Amino acid sequence: MSIKRIVHSSSVISFFTFLSRILGFIRDIVIARLFGIYVYAQAFVVAFKIPNLFRDLLAEGSSNAAFVPVFSQYKIKESPDKFWELVNIVLRFILFILITVTLLGIFFSPWIVRLIAPGFIYEPYKLITTIRLNRIIFPYILLISLASYATAVLNSLGHFSIPAFAPCLLNISLILFTLIFGEGIKGLALGVLVGGVLQLAVQIPVLYKKGFRLIRPRTLRHPELGTIKRLLLPRIFSTCIYQLNNFVDSIFGSLGMIVGEGGVAILYFSYRLIQFPLGIFSNALFQAILPVFSVEALEPAFERLKKTLSWGLGAVFFVMVPCSIGFMILAKPIISTLFGEGRFDLKAVELTSGALFFYSMGLSFYGANKILQACFFSLKDTLTPTKVAGLALILNIILNTILMFPLRIMGLAFATSLSGIITFFILLSLLIKKIGGFHLKELGIYFLRIIFAGLGMGLVCYGLNGVINLSGFALAKYINLGLVIILGLFSYIFFCFIFGVLRLKDIYSRRQFSKELPFNINES
C-alpha cells in the first residue's frame, strides 16, 4: 500500500471518527436532557456498558490484534477461494461463541447487573429497570461483534470508508428512537438494537461486492484459526483489565448512599467529554506513531526511537495540557450549555461539572500513556503495560475507597486522574530502564512552558466567561461558550510565543512534520 493511499485511508477513518464523536455528543445531550442523571439514565449507562465490554473483548480489539493481520497476510499467500473459506470458518467459530455469550447474558442479567451496580440493590425500581433493559439490548453483542468482524474483513481487503461510517448509525438510531419514544426504556432499547442491525447491514453489500459468499466450510479446522486464537488471548486479557477499571467506577458510582444519587450517570457524562480530545488526537497519534516506533525499534541504539518518543510526548502535552486546563476552568459552563436543560437540573450540572474538573487533571497523562504503551508494543513487550494496567486497577480501587468518603462522586473522578498520573511515571521509569534516557530534561522544560502558556489561556477563559454574555436568542449560550473557547485558543497560541513553547514557523515548515523535536535538544 503506497504512502498516498495510507494517508487517504487515515483521513477517511479520522473524518468518520470525528463525525461519530459529534453524533455521540448529540446522543448524550438528548439522553441527558430527557433523563437527567436519574433512573433511566443510570439504567442505560449500566446496561449498555455490559455489551460494550464483550464488544471490546470479542470484536473491536480482536480485529486489530488478530483478524486483520491474519487475513491481510493470508489473502496475499493464498487464492481468493481459500481466503473466503477461511473467512467463513472463522465466522462459524465466532458465531458459536457469540450466540452462547448472548444467551447466557440474557439469562444471567439479574446477577450481572447486581455485580456491576451493587448500589442498585437498595432501589428496586432502578434495579428491575436496568435488568429489563440489559436483557433487551444484550443481543447487541451479537450484532456489533458481527459488524466488527465484517469491518476486519473489509479492512484486510483495503476498504475503510463504509466500516468507518458504520458506528455513526448507532448514534443516529439512538438519537431518533429516544426522541420518538421519550422517557422510558423503549426508545433506548430500540435505538441500540436497530443501530446494531444497521452497522452490520450497511457492510454486507460491500462484502458481497468484494466476493464474500456465505458457505458451509468443509471443515472447521484451519491452521490460521489457531493463529487467531493465540493472538486473541493476550489481547483479551489486557482488555479485561481495562474494562475492569471501568466497572470499578460503575460499582463505586452505584453506591448512592455514599457518593450521592446519579453517580453512574455523572461519571458517564463527564468522562465522555474527556474522551473527545483523547479519541480525536491521542488515539490517532497512537495509530500513526506505532508503525514508526516498530521500524525504529530494530536499530540497536534506539536513537531515532528516543527522538520520536520525545516528539510524541511533546505533541501530546502541547494539545492535551490546554484541553485539561480549559475543561477545569470552563467545566460548569460546558456542562450547563451542553446538557443543562429538561431533566438535567442545576444539581446535575454542579455534580457533573465537579467530576469533569477532577477527570481533567489526568487528561494529559491519559494521552501520554498511549504513547508510552505504543513504544513498549514496538519493542514486542506487551507484558509490561499489562502488568502496569493491573497495578493501576488495584490503585484505582484503593483510591476510590479512600476518596469517595470526603469528596463523594468527585472523589471517584479524582482517583481515576491520580491513577493515570502514577501510571505514567511508572511506565516512563520502566521504559527508561529498557531503552535509556531520552531528552528528559528538555522535555520537562518544554512541559513547564506549556503549563505556563496553558495557565495564561486559563486566566483569559476565566475572564472572558464573565464578560461575554450574549442573550435574547436561542443559540446565545452556545455562541457565548464558543467565543470563549475560540478566543482562549488564540490566547494559547499567543502565550506559546511568550513562553517559547515552539516557533510557530515550524508549524508551516517541513521540520514540524519530519519528527523534529518541538524543542531544541541543545537547550539547558
Image (tube, grey):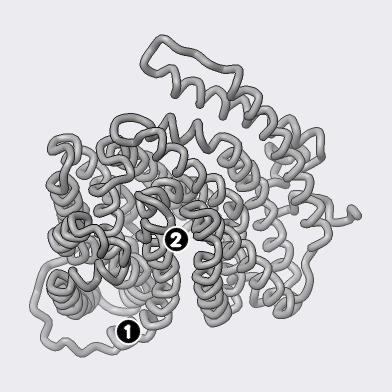
Q: Amino acid at mark 1?
A: Lys
Q: Is residue 333 left or right of residue 301?
A: left
Residues packed near mark 2 inside 10 Å, few (<14), some (14 to 19) or many (20 plus): few
* Badge 2 or badge 1: first in the primary sequence: 2
- The residue carrying mark 1 is 229
The x and y percentages for residue 84 are: 20, 73
Query: What residue lies at 20% left-to-right and 90% top-to-bottom?
Result: 221
The vertical placement of 142 against 41, above or below, is: below
Q: Which residue is mark 2?
A: 1
Q: Is residue 392 above or below residue 473?
A: below
In the image, 232: left or right of 506? Answer: left
**Element marked by disc 2:** loop
Q: Quadrant of the C terminus?
A: bottom right
Q: Nearer the viewer, mark 2 or mark 1?
A: 1
**Quadrant assignment for the N terminus:** bottom left
Q: Amino acid at mark 2?
A: Met
Where residue 8 is drawn, which disc sits there? none
> Residue visible at 73% across and 40% down?
506
